[in-house]
Image (cartoon, rainbow, N blue to C red):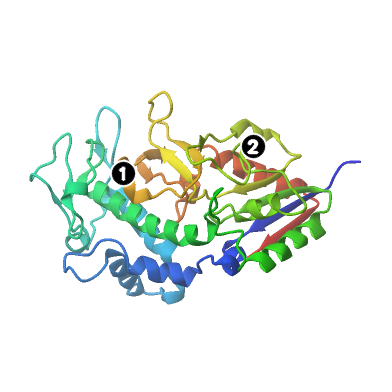
Amino acid sequence: MNKKRNVILFGAGAVIDWGGPKTPDLTKLIRERGFYTKDGKTRITDFIYNKLLEVPGYDETDINFETIINVIEELIVYYANHGLRKKVPALMKPFFNINFEDEILNFSIIGGEVKQLYKLHIPGKDDEWSIMNHGEETPEQFFLQQLLAHLLTDITIEIEQYAYHTASKTNVLTEQNAEMNKLFQDWVNLINGNDVLRMYTLNYDRNFKILLTQSTYKYEIFEGFDCGDVIGYTDQLKPQARRILEDQDSHIHYNLHGSVFWRVRALNQYQLELPEFYLACGAYIEQNTDEFPTFQSEKGKTVFLTNFITGYQKTQRAIFSPFKQMQAAFDRDCIFCDKLIIVG
C-alpha cells in the first residue's frame, strides 16, 4: 500500500512562538541600522522608508523591511555595469535619474580614484577593515552591496538567537521551549502518522527538522544536504541537487528561501564564476565576507547573491542550486500530495 504524502508550508508566523522576529520588528531594526546619509544623522534605510511614504498611495502598512531591501537591490541593478569584455551600464540607466544620489551615496574612494584594486571610505567604518574591490563593481554598486551586507547581518543575528544549534549549545532544545517543542512534535505525528512528511519553510532556520529529529518519534529528515540535526564545526556541506529532484519518498525539510546557516561562494570548486551554496554549522555573517557574489539571471540586471533571499528579487535569485531543485520539489508535492497544510 502506497503511503500518503502530507505537505506542510511554514510561513513567517510559524516560528514566532520560538522567538522568531515579527515583520514590524524587522522593519524597525532595518530602519535603525546600516550607513548614514550625508547629513550624518539619518540612516539610509530610514531615508528610503520616509521617501516611500511621500509617494501617493503608499502608507506604513505597504512598507516593510523587504520593501526597503528591495529598493537597495534595485539601486544595485541601476548602478552595476555588465558584460565580460566590454563593460556597459545597466539597461535602464540612460532613461532615469536618481533624485537622491547626493544624500544616499555617502562614501569616498580611498586614494581618490578608481583603480583595479580600491577601497571605499564609509563614514562610521574603520578604513583599516574596508573590503577590497577587485575592479568588478562600480563604486556605487560596491557601496550599496556593503550596505545590504550589513542589513542582512543584522537579520541573521536576530534569527540565530532562536535557531542556533550545535553539539555543545542549542537555542532550540531549551527548557524554556520544552512544552512548545513537545506540542509541535506530537502535532506533526498526529497529522502524519506513518505517511511521508514533506515540510517546506519560507523562514531561514532549521528548527522544525531539529525538533522532529530529536523527538521520540525519531524522524529521519533530509534537508537538501547530507546531515543530521547537528552540523560539524568545520563542515561545509554541498547540496544534493539530484536527490532533491528525485527523492519523493523521504521525510524532508526544505528552505525555499535559503537559510542563515547556508554559505555562498562567488567561485565554484573549479574557480569559475558560478556561485555555490553550502550548509555550515554557524550562521553566515554577510558583512564579514571579502567577496560579493553577483550574477545576471537576466541580461543587464545584476543581482547580489546571498545565503538567504529577502526583498522582491526572489525569482531572479532563486535560479541557482539548490533553490531551483527545492522549488521544483515543492511544485510536484503540491500537485500530488494528499494533504496540504499552511502554517503561519
Q: Circle 1 is placed at which residue position?
A: 91
Upstream in the sequence, badge 1 or badge 2? 1
Which amino acid, mark 1? Leu
Q: Residue extending furthest top?
A: 270
Element at label 1: loop
Q: Is residue 232 left or right of residue 139?
A: right
Q: Quadrant of the N terminus?
A: top right
Which amino acid, mark 2? Ile
In the rendered view, would you say 25 is above or below 225? below
Q: Going 30% across and 55% down the picture, which residue do you hit?
A: 147
Residue 252 circle label: none
User: How many angstroms separate mark 1 from mark 2 (CA)?
Assistant: 36 Å
In the image, residue 207 lies at what x, y percent?
A: 60, 55
In the rendered view, would you say 322 is above or below 120? above
Q: Quadrant of residue 18?
A: bottom right
Nearer-the-camera pick, 280 or 329: 280
Element at label 2: helix
In the image, residue 62 lies at what x, y percent?
A: 45, 71
Q: Going 25% across and 61% down the picture, which residue do you hit?
A: 35
Q: Residue extending furthest left?
A: 112
Nearer-the-camera pick, 341 or 299: 341
Visible residue check, residue 311 = no
Mark 1 Cα-neighbour bin, 10 Å: few <14, some 14–19, many ≥20: some
Nearest-to-viewer mark from 1 and 2 = 2
Q: Quadrant of the C terminus?
A: bottom right
Nearer-the-camera pick, 336 or 124: 124
Q: Circle 2 is placed at which residue position?
A: 244
Q: Going 42% across and 29% down the picture, which residue do you hit?
A: 268
In the rendered view, would you say 249 is above or below 285? above
